[in-house]
Image (tube, rainbow, N blue to C red):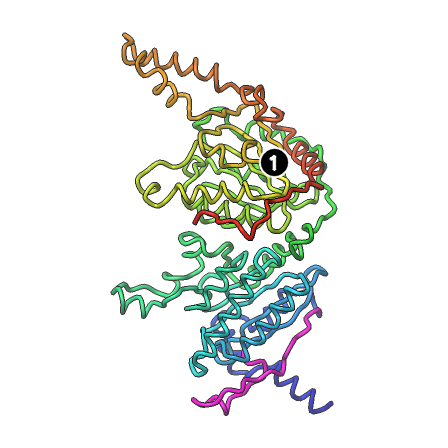
Amino acid sequence: MAGLREIRARALAGPSEKATEAQHAKGKLTARERIELLLDAGSFQEVEQLRRHRATGFGLESKKPYTDGVITGWGTVEGRTVFVYAHDFRIFGGSLGEAHATKIHKIMDMAIAAGAPLVSLNDGAGARIQEGVSALAGYGGIFQRNTKASGVIPQISVMLGPCAGGAAYSPALTDFVFMVRETSQMFITGPDVVKAVTGEEITQNGLGGADVHAETSGVCHFAYTDEETCLAEVRYLISLLPQNNRENPPRVECTDPVDRRSDALLDLVPADGKRPYDMAKLIEEIVDDGEYLEVHERWARNIICALARLDGQVAGIIANQPRTLAGVLDIEASEKAARFVQMCDAFNIPLVTLLDVPGFLPGVGQEHGGIIRHGAKLLYAYCNATVPRISLILRKAYGGAYIVMDSQSIGADLTFAWPTNEIAVMGAEGAANVIFRRQIAEAEDPEAMRDRMVKEYKSELMHPYYAAERGLVDDVIDPAETREVLIRSLAMLQSKHADLPSRKHGNPPQ
């Protein structure tokens, strides 16, 4: 026992105090410190702590530290089981070798078999060059398991250091990616390679830092300034997700009244469709205690994707943001919302869609960039979703964007509208210019004729009850009662069951 205690102490301490100090000097925690922050106190059970590599050559035979640079095991977050692996940068720079990869493969298999979330704490220098192709094969095993686990258990990647080359594909295959500013970077080829091939000079953070991936590429879902905040938010996200695709998200007791009126909504959303407002404030008004977790907050800001609770039940909220680009759908917004809808559907999270959309963004860049196929991704995701789906039209709902944003015609279970709704093929001004083009051109006063035709079109086809009269809207509701209507509707739909056609898988637009 004395010998065992000595070996365990060496494994827990890591390679040296100097290596630990170097890690802290970079503003980074050690792998074990990170696990302690992520999991409930005292709950971590390590797996293969005494594993060592068996490679030889290039000096490896004289360096065989315990854990081989990755700590694997399971613990709990708010009492629920979570599996985790964490690269230990102090050992071989957290690089992946054969033994290192085998440990990760094992913990991933355990997570899939147990039906529990998997969190990877990434801080590694890529493949261990000294082990050659064996290291690359190890990545292949990780990618295969990421794909196997996709839509089965929640997978969360937390970037706490470098992640370069092929290693970056594993986070890209998971459900959520967290990053920490200044200390974490992701890229396929680093700055030196970029400079050698293209002549471009750029820093590591400029190429693949947290802000770049949170705002420009969309690779990162959440970015924070320090590891402590980042890991606290990972815990919060886990609390909103089910253990696996066979369970529902955890429900909590709610003290926020179901029938709480939101009279502030009457003034928050202007009746004038040309005036912007902040959709985030509307979401705060209707969800429990004003709390929600926005996914991809800084990317494609013209649409909001968020997880929140309504009467203690988790729901996914997709909402146009009129404050940015008037809330139009474009390529990035379509991709962002489509992936979020798919994630919610995979993990039995009901969908609430808040519409105020003037259409798709016009322009040569959008058309040449493939807005047709990218917009179709969102359409496909909604049509394929079998979870409860409720849509609420606040103001504008024009053209194809209205159809794509979970209209009743593509399978929404319930569709509600506020009295300010305008559902139409296009705005009244554009419609009048097309339909009454000749009359306007031939009139003595074209502007006066145009104004008259716009009013006529609105009164005939765009009044708030036109869609309701034709069964395309289930009810026109008092905005102040939005919270109650949504909660009671979700409660009714809780036992919804829908089957998809028998098939190996669909072929979604790419």
Left or right: where 299 falls relative to 247? left
Left or right: where 445 falls relative to 479? left
Residue nearest the viewer, comparing 297 with 46: 46
Left or right: where 263 falls relative to 380? right
Q: Which residues are magenta?
A: 43-69
Disc 1 packing (10 Å; few <14; some 14–19; many ≥20): many
Q: Looking at the picture, how far across and down is residue 411, in whole percent? A: 58, 36
Q: Looking at the picture, how far across and down is residue 363, in whole percent? A: 32, 38
Q: Looking at the picture, how far across and down is residue 35, in whole percent? A: 61, 69
Q: Secondary structure at mark 1?
A: strand
Q: Is residue 244 above or below residue 491?
A: below
User: Where is mark 1, residue-wise?
Assistant: 390
- Quadrant housing residue 484: top right
Looking at this rendering, what residue extends furthest in the front direction? Answer: 502
Q: Is residue 295 above or below residue 390?
A: below
Looking at this rendering, what residue extends furthest in the top direction? Answer: 444
Q: Main secondary structure of the magenta part?
A: loop
Total marks in image: 1
Residue nearest the viewer, comparing 134 with 36: 134
Residue at horizontal 43 percent and vertical 89 percent from the top = 58
Does 55 appear in magenta?
A: yes
Can the viewer see residue 291 in this picture? Answer: no
Q: Is residue 397 above or below residue 127?
A: above
Residue at horizontal 48 percent and vertical 14 percent from the top = 459
Q: Amino acid at mark 1?
A: Ile
Can the viewer see residue 475 in this picture? Answer: yes
Residue at horizontal 39 percent and vertical 11 percent from the top = 452
Does 201 appear in magenta?
A: no
State which quarter of the image contains the N terminus: bottom right
Q: Is residue 98 above or below residue 371?
A: below
Residue nearest the viewer, comparing 191 with 430: 430
Q: Looking at the picture, how far across and down is residue 451, in whole percent? A: 37, 14
